[in-house]
Image (tube, grey):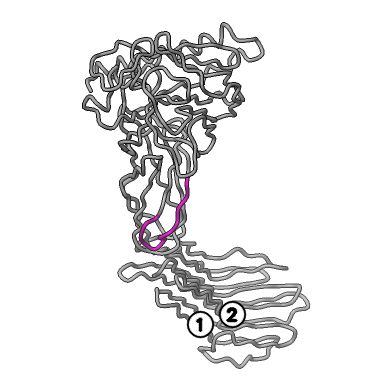
Amino acid sequence: MSAASISVRRALAFLGMLALTFAAVVVAPASRAHAAANVAVQVGYADTARANPANFPTPWEGAPNVTYGGCSVPGGCTFDAGALRVINNTGVNVNVDYIKVSFGTCVFDIWRHNVPLGPSGQYIVTQTINSFSSGCTSDGSFDTSDIGPNGASWAGNCNQSGVVPLVMVSIDGVVSNFPDSGKILNTGGVDGASCGMGNESQQWAPVGSVSCPGSILKLAPSQQELAVGSTASVTANYVNSCGDPLQGAPIAFKVASGPNAGAGDTVSTDASGNATFSYTGTASGTDTVGSTTSNPAGIVSSNNVKVIWDVLLTGDAYGLKSSGLVGITPTPEAGPVATTGASSSSPPCVVTITGLISAGTLCANVSTAVGPSSSTANASVQHVGIGLLLVPAIEIGAVTSTSHSVCSGSTGGATIASITVGGIVVPVSVTPGPNTTVNILGIKLILNEQIATNTATDHVLTVNAVHVIVPGLLDTTVASSTSDIHGCV
């Protein structure tokens, strides 16, 4: 289509909507003066006798927010008829008093009157019986491709009828007339099925537009790469072959293959023809995502897109943390780290902490790697002294902790040089077993404390070299390392 043709089509569509807006503002009762300003009127042609899903007007009966005034029988109808729809984009309730169509002296007034439409509601009308007759009829058929001047039969006629259908719509008492100047309802003024068109379906287009028979469903972005646990979003855009948005079409999204296969949802297109589907990745790998929409003629499919999920590597480490009578935030703290690539977090070591809890030379670091994926955390403290009133003095010698996670699992451990409580030497191994617990003088010590969480795809391990608990008074952790890996398959 030439740029000039598109410009003419857009201008005609704009003038049609301008007429509706002007009538609403000037003629309507004061209480509903602007009710029709954002009501769209569109035309199309429905043909399943010679089915073409991309051309069939979509949405149709059964779509969300659609009030349908047409043939509906068990097993479905065979369609060969013009179609019209009114879309309420006002944001308030409106009432469709009636829809009528004239072909010269032949007037069709076969659909329900006084149809209420809420915000985003649609009223779609077409043939009301499961058959079709040429010419001006009153039985519920609406085979508008076979209507000539003043309702004469135009079946099989390839001569230009010269008939411009007139669409008459009343919204909240405001009557507006729209010439179907593109002759979409009467397939260009000839019997399209007999004159080279074959399938007569015409996709929805603004009344006054030229013919825009087909539709395009496109999914984007074509590829995205994300960390497991984050959210991917893909957007389907559905337009007719002239680029006009097809609002209200239910788009079915589905992850066809990959680690998240089976995820999906159905979302209706907005006024721009867009529908967005979002989901969270649970494991690494590549998902293939597609979308479809359906109508009585069949299914329209989009392109497929890829979502690449990378293993998420996280970790945290610190030298000392305390709560209770003495509060100390994690010092120094490496992380928290969250990445899908190689990284390193190594803050400067802290030389000295003074006060009721004293410590020296505290260090922490977290590193991640790929190929294979891993997360490693380390922490060390040279010495710790805890001196609180009514609490036996605690002295802790040099300690270290480490935690390492890969997709096969997590490992870790701790070393402890020495511990005394109230001057009493606590007998500990330099490399105590996991979760070794000592209770002495009302103080609980957990040595090489290991807290693990494992699932089929995730591994998390926290190792605390020494965990000091004075019930109701103090909770202090010395040399803590946490490594995490998420989304393994």
Q: Nearer the viewer, residue 204 or 355?
A: 204
Q: Amino acid at mark 1?
A: Ala
Where is residue 437? Give x, y as percent.
Answer: 63, 87
Tag of residue 191: none
* Label 2: how many Cα within 10 Å (few below 14, some 14–19, many 20+): many
User: 81 above or below 420?
Assistant: above
Looking at the image, which residue is at 64% across and 10% down? 29
Looking at the image, which residue is at 55% across and 23% down? 90
* Label 1: how many Cα within 10 Å (few below 14, some 14–19, many 20+): many
Badge 1 element: strand
Looking at the image, which residue is at 22% across and 20% down? 2
Where is residue 191? Give x, y as percent.
Answer: 28, 22
Using residue 7 as the reference point, say whether residue 473 is left or right of it.
right
User: 451 above or below 232?
Assistant: below
Q: Is label 2 in contact with label 1 (beta carbons under 8 Å)?
A: yes
User: 117 above or below 104?
Assistant: below
Q: Which circle's residue, 2 or 1, is located before the other in the chain?
A: 1
Q: Quadrant of residue 273?
A: top left
Q: Which residues are magenta?
A: 255-266
As drawn, the residue found furthest toward the top would be 26
Q: Quadrant of the N terminus?
A: top left
Using residue 99 as the reference point, say whether residue 425 is left or right of it.
right
Residue under circle 1? 414
Tell me, yes or no, whether the highlighted magenta stretch contains residue 265: yes
Residue under circle 2? 466
Badge 2 element: strand
Q: Nearer the viewer, residue 332 or 409?
A: 409
Q: Amino acid at mark 2?
A: Val
Q: Nearer the viewer, residue 68 or 457?
A: 68
As drawn, the residue found furthest toward the right would be 390
Where is residue 450? Give x, y as percent.
Answer: 55, 79
Where is residue 164? Give x, y as percent.
Answer: 35, 12
